[in-house]
Amino acid sequence: MTLFGWILRGTILFLILTVIYAVLTFSNRMKEKDRLRQKYNDSKPSIKEEDFVTEGMAKYNRSLKAKLLFGVYIAPILLFGLLIFLAQT
């Protein structure tokens, strides 16, 4: 396989991973917002619902769960790189 073929397959892989990452991120953020709204309705804190959800989403953005989604890129790209390396030897 030529270098152009590897680059083309790598680009296609990257685009597919980007779509998967976007879908997973969007769905997880919506689930987290729903969970926070439910928690707000159950506990009735003294702040407004919008502020409660905003604070909760800020905590979610710093959480490990949000960062683990980045593994959608890391694992397949490392595997792709390993395959390229093994194919060249």
Image (cartoon, rainbow, N blue to C red):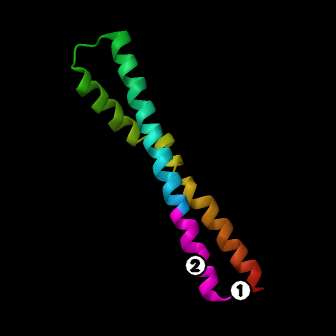
**Secondary structure state at the residue bearing disc 2:** helix
- Which residue shows up at 43% across the image and 43% down it? 26
Q: Quadrant of residue 13?
A: bottom right
Measuring from the top left, give residue 16's x and y in whole percent: 55, 61
Q: Position of residue 47 (x, y in %)?
A: 22, 18
Q: From the viewer's perspective, is residue 70 above or below residue 10? A: above
Residue at image position (22%, 13%) is: 46
Q: What separation in Å lies between label 2 and label 1 (alpha carbons)?
A: 11 Å
Q: Which residue is mark 1?
A: 1
Quadrant placement of the C terminus? bottom right
Tell whether position 25 is magenta: no
> Marks 1 and 2: in contact by CB < 8 Å?
no
Residue toward you, 20 or 80: 20
The numbered dot on residue 75 is none
Residue 29 location in percent, x, y? 42, 38
Q: Is residue 17 shown above or below 45?
A: below
> Which part of the image, by quadrant, shows the N terminus?
bottom right
Quick check: 48 left or right of 60? Answer: left
Magenta stretch, overall SS: helix
Question: Looking at this rendering, what residue extends furthest in the bottom direction?
Answer: 2
Q: Residues within 10 Å of mark 2 (few under 14, many from 20)?
A: few
Residue 31, position as x, y percentages in the image? 45, 31
Looking at the picture, which amino acid does disc 1 mark?
Met
Q: Which residues are magenta?
A: 1-15
Instruction: Name the secondary structure under disc 1.
Output: loop
Q: Quadrant of residue 39?
A: top left
* Residue type, mark 2 in image: Leu
Answer left or right for 48 relative to 86. left
Q: Which mark is residue 8?
A: 2
Q: Is residue 14 magenta?
A: yes
